Image: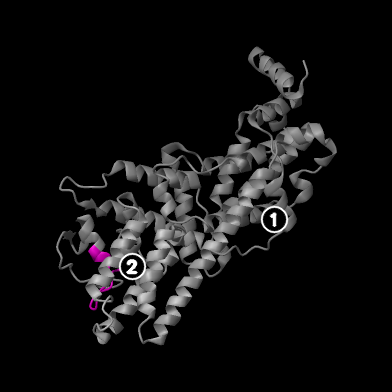
Amino acid sequence: MPQTPPFSAMFDSSGYNRNLYQSAEDSCGGLYYHDNNLLSGSLEALIQHLVPNVDYYPDRTYIFTFLLSSRLFMHPYELMAKVCHLCVEHQRLSEPDGDKNQMRKIAPKILQLLTEWTETFPYDFRDERMMRNLKDLAHRIASGEEQTYRKNVQQMMQCLIRKLAALSQYEEVLAKISSTSTDRLTVLKTKPQSIQRDIITICSDPYTLAQQLTHIELERLNYIGPEEFVQAFVQKDPLDNDKSYLVATEICMPVKKKHRARMIEYFIDVARECFNIGNFNSLMAIISGMNMSPVSRLKKTWAKVKTAKFDILEHQMDPSSNFYNYRTALRGAAQRSLTAHSSREKIVIPFFSLLIKDIYFLNEGCANRLPNGHVNFEKFWELAKQVSEFMTWKQVECPFERDRKILQYLLTVPVFSEDALYLASYESEGPENHIEKDRWKSLRSSLLGRV
């Protein structure tokens, strides 16, 4: 079977590298090329272009791009049904007495296409209709005389089932964490002695905490499928603000000013270590947490903090000029990742909600179809280029040792709601004006039952 190159090799700087496998010009028509680059085509012609034959196997960049973008036009199970039909019809797999020599040539190519689909978009196969079609076509290939095909089909199916089982297990863990999470104020009122610890008593070293945050980020990235970026076009931003609220809670909790200042300096050091690692998502969450109003209003606390390092980090993540400084740092981290000799240097965890926004605006800014009804494939090369870069980053294994105690704390510690954060902030440093005073009274009344 043809060997598939890694994602990083799929797209060159211009968007589409046509030289990985030399594809023949499509004979069925309906496709439009310019300078050997596929720019547009009818949906039917693009589907035909996906299906291999005796003399042709589609370029891997094309497979990834079409499987990613086709779901904007049809459900994956509909595409799979069409692909199966074309495979059976064109290659005469439905005829038991078909040309065995032809079967020998085409079977490994069809199997390779199915393998690429199941490896890159495994979550498509949670749909029973997809799995049914896959099993049917795989069975046709495996029922030939070649023992190798049977073995390869078996391997493909086992690998897919393992991936889907791992996803289900991970979703169960997340659901369990979510169902047991409670508001910190509730815990404080019912069992005040149970929250004596803070993050520094659990992990005094900022570098170690940055490593554990990186574990959580990479694990979550690992379970994101490329198709979820396309689905995000019609969905709300999938991110939550858990980490920002955790940071704000840890800062607002201490009663003493010097302890709050120490906590701020601690998180500044954690943020700097995240930046050095290439974990921009946790970095942004920490900066966001420290910029939340209940934290930023603590002027007496901030007066005790050496803020020079924080100013540098804020400058790096400054949103002006469309996050120019961050994008420059991200490009540097991506370049380091490409030439890396160790997993440590390969880590790139982008600021995720900005990545989602970039892809969303790419989709909004260009039409899916051209005036002649053709699919605008030039747009989808660009979309696939951005998503494939993410696919490379998410496959990096975390090189740091897991610390179960720290991870447990980060994932399960109760955090304050926004109202509780404001209340803690006012209790630490009193209201400065009538508006804050009224809010404080209202919060004391509603949250603590005090007047």
Which residue lies under the disc numbered 2? 60
- Which residue reaches farthest top? 434
Q: Is residue 5 left or right of residue 49?
A: right
On the rendered image, what quadrant is the C terminus found in?
top right
Camera-nearest residue between 161 and 185: 161
Residue 243 appears left or right of 89: right
Mark 1 residue crowding within 10 angstroms, few (<14) / some (14–19) / many (20+): some
Q: Is residue 241 above or below residue 57?
A: above
Disc 1 marks a residue whose amino acid type is Thr
Q: Position of residue 215 (x, y in %)?
A: 62, 57
What secondary structure do most residues of the magenta stretch adopt? loop
Q: Is residue 22 above or below residue 195?
A: below
Q: Quadrant of residue 342?
A: bottom right
The answer, for residue 254, to whether it is visible in the render is no
Q: Amino acid at mark 2?
A: Arg
Mark number displayed over residue 433:
none
Q: Which residues make up the magenta segment?
A: 48-61
Question: Could you tell which of marks 1 and 2 lies nearer the N-terminus?
Answer: 2
Seen from the viewer's position, the closer of residues 162 and 248 is 162
Q: Residue furthest front?
A: 96
Check if residue 381 falls in the magenta segment. Answer: no
User: Which residue occupies 54% across, 67% down?
Assistant: 162
Task: Say which residue label 1 marks.
Answer: 208
Give the side of residue 72 with respect to residue 349, left or right.
Answer: left
Residue positioned 56% across, 57% down in the render? 168
Q: Is residue 335 above or below residue 146?
A: above
Q: Residue 117 at what x, y percent from top left? A: 39, 65
